[in-house]
């Protein structure tokens, strides 16, 4: 799909990973700490700083759009958790850097290092490029996908959102959902 922008014509693309269904974790209580596996992007570069700022705005927008949807449907708002967001961001960075494919690869490991007792967890991922509002595009696509929608409507309490943008301006979004004990 092509889209006109102020900079001419840009290719717009949206790809979703299939929604990971809820995984019950009986008696799970993780006591592991994150090992700091975050990819360290070069923050001395102005472009990197602007990209990080833009990624933070997209994260906030995804979180707000998902909660807005939940409230309109009579569901409780999700609480944003920084630890969960760090794991979501780490996965998005790995996808953006092509260390892993657009997928849920490593999901069990990602949630196992979150030091929050939970009963179940789910994840949505998306990739897009060329859209003026990547958060709106990803959320709209998730809402139109049965498996992603199940996660959004699930009986979860906490969430984390992580976004990474690579040098090709490809936007990777991960949202993790947890139902706490």
Image (cartoon, helix red, strand yellow):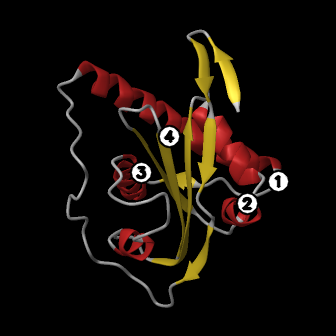
Assign a secondary structure to mark 2: helix
Mark closer to the observer (1, 4): 4
Q: Distance from label 3 to label 1 (Cα)?
A: 28 Å
**Mark closer to the chain start, 3 or 4:** 4
Answer whether labels 2 and 3 touch (C-beta < 8 Å): no
In this rendering, the answer to whether 125 lies above or below 104 is above
Residue at image location 25% in from the left, 65% down from the top: 34
Task: Quote the CA–CA distance across marks 2 and 3.
Answer: 20 Å
Percent x, y for residue 35? Answer: 20, 64
User: Does 142 sit left or right of 31 as displayed?
Assistant: right
Disc 2 to disc 1: CB gap under 8 Å: no
Residue at 49% x, 57% y: name it: 102
Residue on which disc 1 sits = 73
Visible residue check, residue 159:
yes
Residue 23 point in image, percent of width and height? 56, 80
What residue is disc 2 on?
149
Report the Cα–Cα distance between label 2 and label 1. 12 Å
Circle 1 packing at 10 Å, graded few (<14), some (14-19), many (20+), is few
Q: Are marks 3 and 1 in contact (CB under 8 Å)?
A: no
- Mark nearer the N terminus (2 vs 1): 1
> Do the CB atoms of the residues marked 4 and 2 lie less than 8 Å apart?
no
- For the point 48% across and 45% down, the residue is 172
Q: Secondary structure at mark 1?
A: loop
* Residue at (43, 69) in percent of width and height: 105
Q: SS class of the residue under badge 3? A: helix
Quarter residue 24 falls in: bottom right
Q: Which mark is residue 59?
A: 4
How far separated are the C-alphas under marks 3 and 4?
11 Å
Q: Which mark is residue 92?
A: 3
Q: Comparing marks 3 and 4, which lies closer to the viewer?
A: 3
- In the rendered view, tell whether residue 106 sits above or below residue 45: below
């Amino acid at each position: 799909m092509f889209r006109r922008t102020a900079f001419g014509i840009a290719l717009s693309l949206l790809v979703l990973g299939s929604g990971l269904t809820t995984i019950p974790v009986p008696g799970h209580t993780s006591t592991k700490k994150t090992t700091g596996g975050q990819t360290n992007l070069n923050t001395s570069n102005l472009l990197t700083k602007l990209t990080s700022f833009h990624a933070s705005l997209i994260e906030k927008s995804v979180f707000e759009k998902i909660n807005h949807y939940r409230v309109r449907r009579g569901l409780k708002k999700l609480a944003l958790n920084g630890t969960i967001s760090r794991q979501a961001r780490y996965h998005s960075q790995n996808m953006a850097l092509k260390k892993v494919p657009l997928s849920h690869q490593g999901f069990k490991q990602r949630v196992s290092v979150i030091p929050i007792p939970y009963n179940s967890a789910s994840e949505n991922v998306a990739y897009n490029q060329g859209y003026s509002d990547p958060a709106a595009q990803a959320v709209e696509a998730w809402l139109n996908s049965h498996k992603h929608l199940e996660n959004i409507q699930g009986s979860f309490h906490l969430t984390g959102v992580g976004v990474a943008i690579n040098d090709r301006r490809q936007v990777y979004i991960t949202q993790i959902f947890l139902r706490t004990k």
